Amino acid sequence: MNNIIAIPAFKDNYIWAIHSLEGNKIIVVDPGDASPVLDYLQANKLSLHAILITHHHFDHSGGIKALQAQFPNIAVYGSKNEFTEGVTSTIEEGSQLYFPEFNLTLNVLDIPGHTKGHIAYYNEEILFCGDTLFSCGCGKIFEGTPSQMLQSLEKLKQLSAETMMYCGHEYTKANIAFAQTVDPTNAALAQRLAEVLKCEAQGRPTLPTKLKNEFACNPFLRVNTQEIILAVQKHWNFEAIDPVTLFSHLREWKNQF
């Protein structure tokens, strides 16, 4: 498996750097800011091989132009279903990317909701899901619908439980606070919090994490479980059991948290 490093950006973004097998090139995922990428390249004597964009939001794409200025012929991959300035190759669900020097194949999933054209890159080992799925949470619904977001999360639930999930932000601790409000007796959540506090004490990212942890901890992946259904019904004082209604009310609960 390729060595994948978190490059912090802004307040809580992660730009993911995928190293080639020889170790002298990287692919970066969602460079919202070029400066930390350029600093990382210089400090480690690396060159930039390609850029992968999950969605158009500036904190995930704002560094493209400055990186293109330094690497004029760089391939920049992004969604066919939304415009991102600087993208040179548009892709969609069913597309597959192969990087020989990395021995890396990545498949593409359409996962709209946060934005209308949000995509994920994945294989049997790794998942780059931008702002659709977070550890113990999910993204806000800015351009899509609750139904789209729920369908996107259901797609991600079909991936292997052993897949390592790399998302776009360090939101884990705050997400756990909400998740424990919804699902207070979940022992897996308590264990995840202990891990997160240890990471925080050591100055390490809480990511990546295996999808199996999310299947156990993340309320947005568990809207079909009795615990989450009852919690949402109680909070909003209704008896609805429709999954989209439950999901949309769970997301609104988090918005207000």
Image: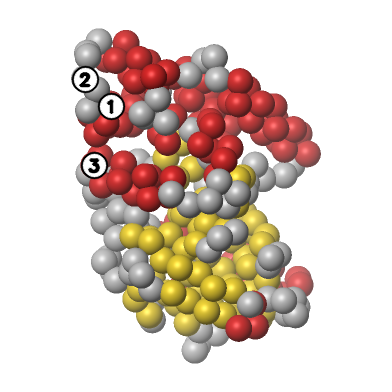
103 horizontally vs 156: left or right: right
Q: Residue 70's image quarter?
A: bottom right
Q: Please indicate, yes or no, whether residue 123 appears anywhere in the rendered image.
A: yes
As drawn, 81 above or below 70? above
Q: Which residue is denoted by mark 3 in the rendering?
A: 147
The secondary element bearing badge 3 is classed as helix
28 horizontally vs 253: left or right: right
Q: Nearer the viewer, residue 93 or 49?
A: 93
* CA separation in Å, label 1 and label 2: 7 Å
Looking at the image, which residue is at 22% across and 28% down? 242
Looking at the image, which residue is at 48% across and 25% down? 179
Quadrant of the drawing holding the N terminus: bottom right
Looking at the image, which residue is at 50% across and 69% down? 106
Q: Residues within 10 Å of mark 1 (few under 14, many from 20)?
A: many
Quadrant of the drawing holding the C terminus: top left
The secondary element bearing badge 2 is classed as loop
As drawn, 14 above or below 89? above
Query: Which amino acid does the dot numbered 2 rest on?
Result: Ala
Looking at the image, which residue is at 47% across and 82% down? 75
The secondary element bearing badge 1 is classed as helix
Q: Are marks 2 and 3 in contact (CB under 8 Å)?
A: no
Query: Which amino acid does the dot numbered 3 rest on?
Result: Ser
Residue 31: image location, x then y, percent: 51, 64
Q: Which residue is denoted by mark 2 in the rendering?
A: 240
Q: Residues within 10 Å of mark 2 (few under 14, many from 20)?
A: some
Q: Nearer the viewer, residue 127 or 39?
A: 127
Q: In terms of sequence position, does the residue under pointer 2 or pointer 3 come before the other?
A: 3
